Image (spheres, rainbow, N blue to C red):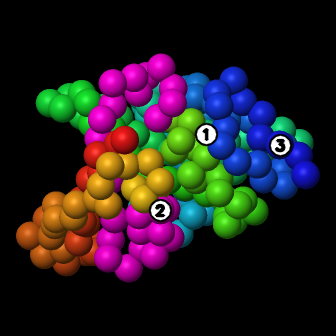
Amino acid sequence: MITTHSDLEADTTIDLQILLRHPQSTDGYHVNRLIDRCKPLDTNSTYCNLLQCLHFADTCMLAEDQEDNSLLGFISAYRKPAEPNTLFVWQVAIDKRARGEGLARTLLTNLLASDACAGVTHLETTITADNAASWGLFESFARSQATDSGTRHLLFDQQRHFNGDSSSEILFRITLG
């Protein structure tokens, strides 16, 4: 078994040699390709991912396969401007080669332990009702890292906000322990 390598503190190992790090602007294109491979995630423009990797690098994290330098995972997040103690997780993308190995949780744990997340007391994300993988990740994370099991409420309605083109997004908010 090869352990995860990082300048951050990992809480698990997986059967790949992986480097966890904050992205650089040159990672934006590869992040876009990773997200495109992770259906049913919404693919943003490459430009959007370039900006995430440049402007929000401190609150995003990626997992890079050390053998072939490919991206295996990416979390995009930001501190909410009106609530800087809240980290909003925008997307979690895990390549199929690394699914089921705890990589998403490792990325999330390391991101929250990074200097950029000092003082974060709440974590928020939105999840569609049918996204079992995301519910599993965030509910499990809440059970192990939070002081509550999380609260839910409808944030973006399928008809009112998406004109029927996308599923409703439920806001899941947890208080970190």
Seen in the picture, residue 174 relative to 58 is either above or below; the reply is below
Q: Select label 2 or label 1 by which is in front.
A: 2
Mark 2 Cα shell of 10 Å, populated few (<14), some (14-19), many (≥20):
some
Q: Secondary structure at mark 3?
A: loop
Residue at which label 1 appears: 62
Give the residue drawn at x 33%, y 31%: 120
Q: Nearer the viewer, mark 3 or mark 1?
A: 3
Distance of mark 3 from mark 2, alpha carbons? 22 Å
Q: Secondary structure at mark 2?
A: helix
Residue 177 is covered by the magenta coloring? no
Could you say where residue 10 lies in the image, as x and y percent from the top left?
67, 38
| Mark 3, residue position | 3
**Badge number at residue 140:** 2
Q: Which residues are magenta?
A: 112-140
- Residue kind at label 3, given as amino acid type: Thr
Q: Earlier in the sequence, mark 3 or mark 1?
A: 3
Task: Name the residue: 58% across, 44% down.
Answer: 107
- What residue is rendered at 83% in x and 38% in y? 66
Residue 37, how many percent across, how many down? 61, 62
Give the residue furthest to the left.
Answer: 160
Q: Please check the rendered image and state whether residue 124 is part of the magenta-colored stretch, yes or no.
A: yes
Whether residue 83 appears in this view of the structure is yes
Spatial distance from mark 2 to mark 1, Cα to Cα?
Answer: 20 Å
Crowd tier of the residue under label 1, counting other residues whose Cα lies within 10 Å: few below 14, some 14–19, many 20 or above:
many
Q: Position of residue 96 (x, y in %)?
A: 69, 65
